[in-house]
Amino acid sequence: MRIDILTLFPGMFEGPFNHSILKRAQENMLLQINTINIRDFSKNKHHTVDDTPCGGGAGMVMGPEPLFECFDYLQEQNGGQVGRVIMMCPQGEPFTQEYAKELAKEENLVIVCGHYEGIDERVREVLVTDEISIGDYVLTGGELPAMVVVDAIARMIPGVLGETASAEEDSFYNGLLEYPHYTKPRVYRGYEVPEILLSGHHENIRKWRRRQSLLRTLERRPELLKEVELTKEDKKVLLELQQQLQSLKFENNK
Ligand code: 4GX
């Protein structure tokens, strides 16, 4: 996959994309990340990219010209087509694992990172196909959100994760939160690894992990349970857990 990132601060991407898994993905030609400086496409004397808002008000707005010019360049480079064009903004569609999986199927992506109060509406109307938000808070620019989106997409590209660290065992792959993980030593500063994980009894371990996943989801993100496919056994466990939590609450209020 090739991802073109349009930004006023290409240097911000140097750290995150040149380490660990994203670095390896690029070395293995599974991913090509290309940052483009929007300022290079400004045609005015001082290479400015922003201006005061029409209609007045505080702050600055990124103008249409450099971004439209930048798209002309991308189109020329790609023989007319640019594929999906993502703009990072708080008004966008909430980013989810499902969304990441869907975007991982694309051959090319363009991500536009805005700054200041925002981007001229005509860019959104004419050039952008997807507006994405990474959460309900306001950041200083679209660069950090773009990194989050690229990272989540990259690890869903076949071959990017090693064979042992499979994306299919993640939290959210099955719609539930992950069970707790442990490694050696068996006892550290007196804190023990749950006995069952050392038992070698694979079926019991599987059941315990599933139960922990259900418990965590019930306690922390109960709304997720509506979306997952639950087995008969899951439902039985959930009912039991619900009753346990209920009686715990009751005891605490006594
Ligand atoms: N999830 N921001 C973008 C500037 C901006 C505003 C409007 C385009 C249109 C954010 C988020 C986020 C702050 C990035 C404002 N660009 N992006 N920026 N939360 O807060 O994605």
Image (tube, rainbow, N blue to C red):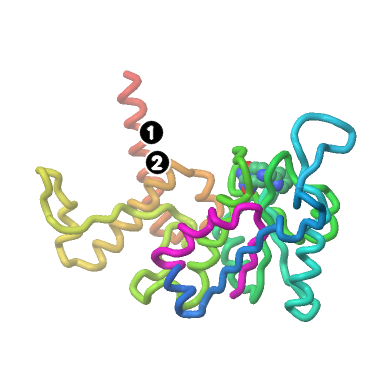
Answer yes or no: is residue 136 visible.
no
From this view, report whether residue 3 is shown above or below residue 241: below
Which residue appears at 32% of the width and 31% of the height? 248
Which residue appears at 52% of the width and 57% of the height? 228
**Spot occupied by residue 67 in the image (x, y as percentages of width and height):** 77, 58
Answer yes or no: is residue 208 visible.
yes
The alpha-carbon separation of the residues under discs 2 and 1 comes to 6 Å
Q: Name the mark on residue 18.
A: none
Residue span colored magenta = 1-22
From this view, report whether residue 139 is shown above or below residue 205: above
User: From this viewpoint, which residue is outermost toward the top?
Assistant: 254
**Mark 1 C-beta to ligand 1 under 8 Å:** no
From this view, report whether residue 101 is shown above or below residue 237: below
**Circle 1 sits on which residue?**
246
Q: Nearer the viewer, residue 152 or 55?
A: 55
Q: Quadrant of residue 128?
A: bottom right
The amino acid on which the numbered mark 2 sits, given as a three-letter code, is Gln
| Element carrying mark 2 | helix
**Spot occupied by residue 100 in the image (x, y as percentages of width and height):** 58, 62
**Mark 2 C-beta to ligand 1 under 8 Å:** no
* Residue 107 left/right relative to 125: left
**Circle 2 sits on which residue?**
242
If the picture is divided into quarters, which one holds ligand 1?
top right
